[in-house]
Image (cartoon, rainbow, N blue to C red):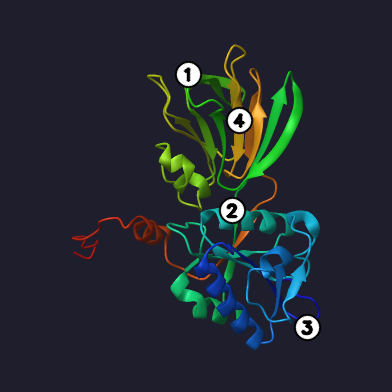
Amino acid sequence: MTTNGDTRTVFLLAHTGRPAAIRSAELVVQGLLAHGIGVRVLAKEAADLPLPPEVERIEKNAPECGGMDGCELLVVLGGDGTLLRGAEFARASGVPMLGVNLGRIGFLAEAERDDLEKVVDRVVGRAYEVEERMTLDVLVRDNGHVVHTNWALNEASVEKAARERLLEVVIEVDGRPVSGFGGDGVVCATPTGSTAYAFSAGGPIVWPNVEALLMVPISAHALFAKPLVTGPDSVLAVEIRHHAQPGVLWCDGRRSVGLSPGARVEVRRGTVPVRLARLHHAPFTDRLVAKFALPVAGWRGAAH
């Protein structure tokens, strides 16, 4: 883990629009400072948080600004949107992200609101492990020219731009066409994103340790428009037909760009992963059951 001399520093990112996040941030900051660990926050967030003067304020808000240099950990307090925002900072810096869920489901989070004391203790004792999550590299071609590049941790979705119109697309895997249809769009996802938009669109849940790419049609008007799971080295492509209506590309539901008729979106395994700090060794199955409150009453196990 990265340190700055003998001084340990943690970067804190919070959804300051949530009262719970403000109180949680205050508790985390107090706990870290009490153990001699420095805390760094964005200046625009600090204005909404009751922070002591020794907390370092960073004026620049862009993930690539270098504000996380020297930090050993990024602690994020909030819901899924805040966690995905934190992932932008984590990817740009290489600093592991530890998410505390203050929202509804929060699959990217490692802890819940009631675990704040435990989170502080684990950070102080460096009692956490770091795992890498696959990302997506995304590019858009128009008339053969690359006109846009982006990335995603969860998914890159090609969607219709007009609510009242279908989006006409042809999907491709490894340079070969698979099917064409009209619908609301197509989601290309990582295993991490399989429990997000891809899941809502009817895709399978893929365990995070599986290396794969997913392609899930959204409300397709077609007999064959099933979710596809490919190897991690495959290249997925979604082409908007030339006669079709324009579309829009969304990456993690946070960054978007318009797509003209004939545009082509290519998705491949990302070259830069996102590092997540893990506090628990519980299997993903248990997390799945807990997050979705799945009915498992009556299970007896192999011993019976």
Residue type at mark 4 is: Val
The picture places residue 74, in percent across and down from the top left corner, at 65, 67
**Mark-to-mark CA distance, 2 and 4:** 19 Å
Within 10 Å of disc 3 (Cα), the crowding (few <14, some 14-19, many 20+) is few
Residue type at mark 3 is: Asp
Within 10 Å of disc 2 (Cα), the crowding (few <14, some 14-19, many 20+) is many
Nearest the camera: 28 or 21?
Answer: 21
| Vertical position of residue 27 compared to residue 79: above or below | below
The picture places residue 181, in percent across and down from the top left corner, at 47, 18
Within 10 Å of disc 1 (Cα), the crowding (few <14, some 14-19, many 20+) is many
Q: Residue at x 42, y 36 (%)?
A: 201
Is residue 150 among the parts visible in the rendering? yes
Q: Please tell me whether mark 2 sits on a helix, a strand or a loop.
A: helix
Whether pointer 1 and pointer 3 mark residues with C-beta atoms closer than 8 Å, the reply is no
Mark 2 or mark 3, which is nearer to you? 2
Image-based side of 49 in relation to 292, left or right = right
Residue type at mark 2 is: Leu
**Mark-to-mark CA distance, 1 and 3:** 59 Å
Residue at label 3? 6
Image quarter hosting the C terminus: bottom left
Whether pointer 2 and pointer 4 mark residues with C-beta atoms closer than 8 Å, the reply is no
**Mark-to-mark CA distance, 4 and 3:** 47 Å
- Pick whichever of labels 2 and 1 is earlier in the sequence: 2
Whether pointer 2 and pointer 1 mark residues with C-beta atoms closer than 8 Å, the reply is no
Q: Residue furthest top?
A: 243
